[in-house]
Image: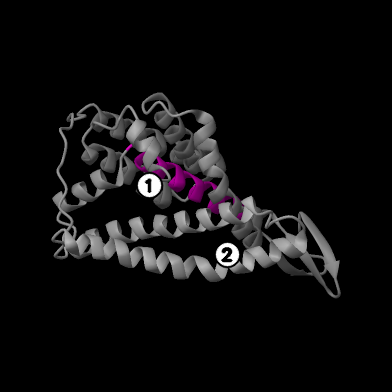
Amino acid sequence: MGTDRYAYQSRLRRISPMPKLLLTGSALVLCLLCDSVTVGLVTLLGMWGLVTALGGLSPRVFLRFLCVPMAFLAIGCVTILINSYPQGAPVLLAVPVGERLWGFDGAALLRAGRLFCKALGAVGAMYFLALNTPVTDVTMALERMHVPHLLVELMELIYRFIFVLTETASRIRLAQESRLGYQGVRRSLSSLGTLASMVFLRAWRKADRVYTALESRGYSGSLVTLSGGYARGAWLYPLTAAVAAVQLAAWYLERSVMG
């Protein structure tokens, strides 16, 4: 399901999730705190390199996973980039609309670029964890870190039911496509409306059956799973320090250049 397929195929699959969580958390926190274009790009490229070199993932697959968050980020950054200015304001690019100018200046461009790069770097850090560590390993690591048990169980159940929803939607769409339900605009809109009305009802029924199956197997509010044997992955700790050092060096270099 989703990134889990690649996580189970990763060369880092059998390494303990704790050092991977530390690497992800360290890179994520520094990327957000530094609030820097350079640090965001360095974090993204660094995580991309680690996932492909250490995890064995194809660079093309990683890029495909980036496309969806990049699209959302681009839309969000456009709303930050475009502003209204009075006539004669020092803008880089603007279109006159009535008595105002709609466009962006250097400060808005820098602000939007910083946000875009910082968010992409954070996404890259999270992908390092998601593409190398199955969700069951993450939840076991969170339990060892004494995260409240209720939150861990909710995360597991929500993760499962998200894919119940997407699986139901994909099956309904496949059935519609096999009956030429998306030939033409009018028929496509009708099929899309039917899909939207049916998917939640069927997903609700399937989720109810899943919960009934859990109860029939003795579910009492706790999902107990066996942990496999993990390699310690001690070499990831100096790698975490090296990644943090590169991020801080990039931040310092940008501050020095920008003054």
Image-quadrant location for residue 53: top left
Q: Does 104 sit left or right of 113 as displayed? A: right
Q: Which residues are magenta?
A: 110-132
Q: Residue at x 34, y 41 (%)?
A: 129
In-front residue for pair 28/70: 70
Q: Does 55 sit left or right of 105 as displayed? A: left
Coordinates of residue 113 in the picture (x, y in percent): 60, 50
Q: Which mark is residue 28?
A: 1
Coordinates of residue 136 in the picture (x, y in percent): 25, 46
In-front residue for pair 15/117: 15
User: Is residue 111 at least partly visible in the picture?
Assistant: no
In this view, 148 is above or below 231: below
Q: Residue furthest bottom?
A: 99
Q: Which mark is residue 252?
A: none
- Mark 2, residue position: 195
SS state under label 2: helix
Coordinates of residue 232 in the picture (x, y in percent): 17, 30
Q: Residue at x 60, y 55 (%)?
A: 112
| Amino acid type, callout 2 | Leu
User: Is residue 58 at least partly visible in the picture?
Assistant: yes
Image-quadrant location for residue 102: bottom right
| Amino acid type, callout 1 | Leu
In this view, 247 is above or below 149: above
**Mark 1 → mark 2, Cα distance in angstroms:** 37 Å
In this picture the colour scheme is: one colour
Q: Does 49 sit left or right of 8 as displayed? A: right
Chief SS of the magenta region: helix
Q: Is residue 123 magenta?
A: yes
